[in-house]
Amino acid sequence: MSVILHNADCFDIFPTIADGSVDLVCADIPYGTTQCRWDSVLDLSLMWEQLYRIAKPTAAIVLFSAQPFTSVLVASNLRHWRSEWIWEKGNATGFLNAKKQPLRAHENIEVFYRRQPTYNPQMTEGHTRKTSKRKTVNSECYGKALTLTEYDSTKRYPRDVQFFSSDKQIGNFHSTQKPLALVKYIIETYSNPGDLVLDFTMGSGTSGVACQELGRAFIGIEKESDIFQAACQRMGVKQECAA
């Protein structure tokens, strides 16, 4: 599958992407909660304008966030906000304020779309449920009766709170890098093999690696040159090009 990477500001690249060409947008946009150079909140009005032009009407737009930015993000597009995932982390933060407030051990993932998108629920296996018994009306002729209800599946639909450990132990290229398993989970849920996925703030390229492993085409945009080079290295792309 094709991989196209751009080392540029996303608003400079958006005009080069064809109308209605993207099947899924998945991005970890800046929250504006740190003093880092790259953590400046985007122009959300302009972002939505461009994403709606680029994405198919049935494309999901899935954006990572954390409070208080989550409230700002959702309020920027209440009309098309649909659902939220909670990523439960293995490592909490906020220890300096542990005596004043609870540790922070989750982030938000907000889902927007205009029309029903691809949705492939990632089923899990549960325990085998016991056959239940329900009393029916007794009959003078046939005596006491029981109705048996059997369950033929141990599959379980996903809940909106999902636990994923960080990838710090196996390689951390960016301070806000998301676990590869989590990003793959989102991409598998909202796209199909062969679809085109856009990450317009790709950071170290976790979404691109996920697309390579899952058979999706990928367009990635990253403004910071050093982080962009890390993304190229992870995906095996030597320069800004289509691979």
Image (tube, helix red, strand yellow):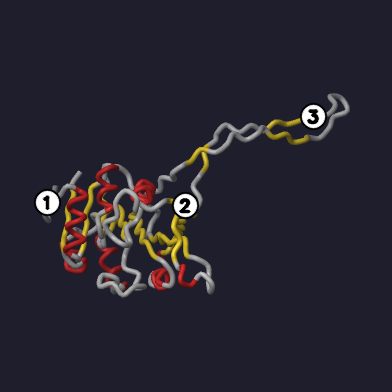
> Is 169 left, or right, of 156 in this rendering?
left
Q: Residue 69: where, in percent of width, then height?
A: 40, 71
- For label 3, the residue is 145
Q: Position of residue 139 (x, y in %)?
A: 85, 29
87 sits to left or right of 14? right
Residue shown at 19% from the left, 66% from the top: 223
Q: Which residue is mark 1?
A: 238
Chain-order first, disc 2 or disc 1: 2
Quadrant of residue 143 within the rendered picture:
top right
Task: Name which residue lies at 29% across and 71% down.
Answer: 39
Mark 1 or mark 3: which comes first in sequence?
3
Which secondary structure lies at badge 3? loop
- Kind of element beneath mark 1: loop
Element carrying mark 2: strand
How crowded pointer 1 is (Cα within 10 Å; few <14, some 14-19, many 20+) is rated as few
Residue type marked 2: Gln
Q: Nearer the viewer, residue 226 or 70?
A: 226
Q: Mark 3 belongs to which amino acid?
A: Ala
Badge 2 local density, few (<14 within 10 Å), some, or many (20+)?
A: some
Residue 200, position as x, y percentages in the image:
25, 61
State the residue in front, 81 or 201. Answer: 201
Residue at which label 2 appears? 162
